[in-house]
């Protein structure tokens, strides 16, 4: 059974994806997306913290993606992969209570579930390169 934090990451990933395509108010999108998880998650504070953190540090995060995946312009990366990377990088660099290896593992699991056949390898490669450079 997935943890509430894993589900919080899923909600955040889906929110970032929807926000990119439709714009709007990110927190309102998060609450809408969370409705799909009704009964499975009671506390949205973790998802909201992730969302706010990713949006606050997005420029820094995109700079790291450019540096560690130079052959892939950020705007050409599949939106779902980009959202997964944004969450993973934010957690690796700015989360005090999530070890970097957990952030990487969680991002890989999201890529397996929601990405393409190549997503898992791509996400793993970028996040591990950043991890090793830290």
Image: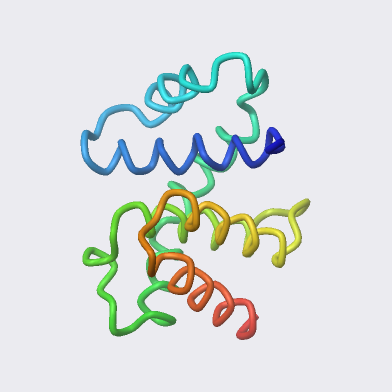
Q: Position of residue 105 (x, y in %)?
A: 65, 61
**Colour scheme in the image?**
rainbow
Residue found at x 45% / y 43%: 13
Q: Is residue 69 left or right of residue 130?
A: left
Q: Position of residue 58 (x, y in %)?
A: 41, 56
Quadrant showing the C terminus: bottom right
Residue found at x 52% / y 52%: 110
Q: Quadrant of residue 77?
A: bottom left
Residue found at x 25% / y 73%: 73
Quadrant showing the N terminus: top right
Q: Position of residue 100 (x, y in %)?
A: 70, 65
Q: Position of residue 89 (x, y in %)?
A: 54, 63
Q: Is residue 106 above or below residue 130?
A: above
Q: Is residue 19 above or below residue 110?
A: above
Q: Quadrant of residue 49?
A: top right
Q: How many marks?
A: 0
Q: Is residue 18 left or right of residue 107?
A: left
As rendered, which of 60 and 14 lies closer to the eye?
Answer: 14
Residue found at x 47% / y 17%: 35
């Amino acid at each position: 059974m997935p943890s509430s934090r894993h589900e919080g990451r899923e909600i955040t990933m889906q929110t970032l994806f929807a926000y990119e395509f439709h714009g709007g108010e990110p927190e309102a999108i998060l609450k809408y997306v969370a409705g799909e998880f009704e009964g499975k998650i009671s506390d949205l504070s973790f998802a909201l913290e992730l969302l706010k953190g990713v949006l606050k540090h997005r420029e820094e995060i995109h700079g790291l993606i450019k540096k560690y995946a130079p052959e892939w312009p950020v705007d050409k990366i599949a939106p779902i992969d980009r959202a997964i990377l944004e969450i993973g990088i934010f957690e690796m660099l700015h989360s005090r209570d999530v070890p970097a290896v957990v952030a990487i593992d969680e991002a890989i699991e999201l890529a397996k579930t929601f990405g393409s056949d190549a997503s898992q390898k791509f996400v793993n490669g970028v996040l591990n390169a950043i991890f090793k450079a830290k």
